[in-house]
Image (cartoon, grey):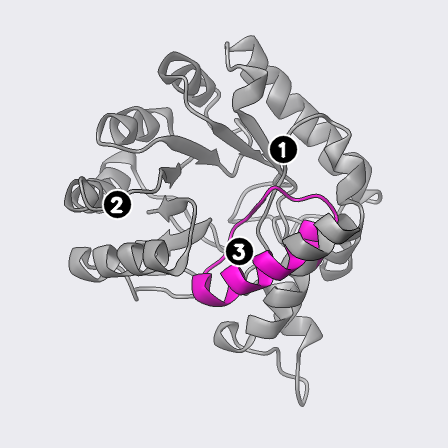
């Protein structure tokens, strides 16, 4: 899954693809590089970020969806927490929904997914983007994530989303300590026991910057490629079905080799 942030303030590539021509160029480049899914997000969820209105989110999304219509052959996922945005984006050509709040922000999003018969990604987040790194971390991160994901998929199932349409994401970096992120990657087999496919997004995240720090300073996002590659490999070997990444050409190679390793095992 290739990440396309059409925001002015993303932690990893803020403003880089904020214009429609640049966003379309990036989307097509990811498709050529081997991405299987394109995930478009118009609202930043970086630590400390504040939300935007549905109108602003749609103003960013819709021109890009319109420009990509007929050009993109891979499915588009919309990274949104709002049912109104989800409904309109699906009507404009999107084929998946990715809710980083796990239906905690707007549970009606599940009804949209059920009515449209589209896949729904449910992520675990402790708190919200504005506060998630300021709240106390869970004492037992695995138990906390399992509990939160169970709550999310039960909401989705009650709203009519088919089990086959649900994908779970442990939410690496979303309200977890740096050490807890690594613990979750190691514990992915335990999350797989919930019975749903797993998506994992580690790309360029802060815990990698901390691990790769030099002279007391975290490595900046554009210097976290090899750290990302290591975590993508670990995710696949531990059972991830989808890896969400910014650097598609490089991570396609990583995924192919990790898949070969997993098959050999």
- Per the rendered image, the range of residues in magenta is 234-258
Q: Which residue is mark 1?
A: 197
Q: Which mark is residue 72?
A: 2
Left or right: 125 as drawn, with respect to 63:
right
Q: Main secondary structure of the magenta part?
A: helix
Q: Quadrant of residue 75?
A: top left
Q: Quadrant of residue 206?
A: bottom right
Give x and y (percent) for residue 22.
22, 62
Q: Which mark is residue 47?
A: 3
Q: Residue furthest bottom?
A: 215
In-front residue for pair 69/106? 69
Left or right: 121 as drawn, with respect to 152:
left
Residue at point 19% right, 59% down?
19
Q: CA distance from mark 1 to mark 2?
A: 25 Å
Residue at point 24% right, 25% down?
91
Mark 1 touches mark 2? (CB < 8 Å): no
């Amino acid at each position: 899954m290739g990440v396309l942030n059409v925001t002015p303030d993303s932690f990893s590539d803020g403003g880089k693809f904020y214009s429609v021509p640049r966003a379309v160029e990036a989307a097509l480049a990811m498709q050529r590089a081997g991405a299987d899914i394109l995930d478009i997000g118009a609202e930043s969820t970086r630590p400390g970020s504040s939300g935007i209105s549905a109108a602003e989110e749609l103003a960013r999304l819709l021109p890009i969806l319109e420009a990509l219509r007929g050009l993109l052959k891979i499915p588009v996922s919309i990274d949104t927490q709002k049912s109104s945005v989800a409904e309109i984006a699906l009507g404009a050509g999107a084929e998946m929904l990715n809710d980083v709040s796990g239906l905690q922000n707007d549970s009606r999003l599940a009804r949209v997914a059920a009515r449209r018969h589209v896949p729904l990604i449910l992520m675990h987040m402790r708190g919200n983007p504005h506060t998630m790194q300021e709240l106390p971390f869970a004492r037992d991160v695995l138990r906390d994530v399992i509990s939160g994901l169970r709550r999310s998929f039960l909401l989705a199932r009650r709203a009519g989303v088919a089990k086959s349409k649900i994908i779970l994401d442990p939410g690496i970096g979303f309200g977890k300590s740096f050490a807890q992120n690594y613990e979750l990657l190691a514990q992915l087999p335990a999350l797989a026991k919930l019975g749903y496919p797993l998506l994992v997004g580690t790309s360029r995240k802060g815990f990698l910057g901390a691990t790769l720090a030099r002279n007391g300073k975290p490595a900046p996002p554009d210097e976290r490629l090899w750290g990302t590659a290591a975590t993508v490999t670990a995710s696949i070997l531990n059972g991830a079905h989808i890896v969400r990444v910014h650097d598609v050409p490089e991570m396609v190679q990583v995924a192919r080799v990790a898949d070969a390793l997993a098959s050999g095992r």
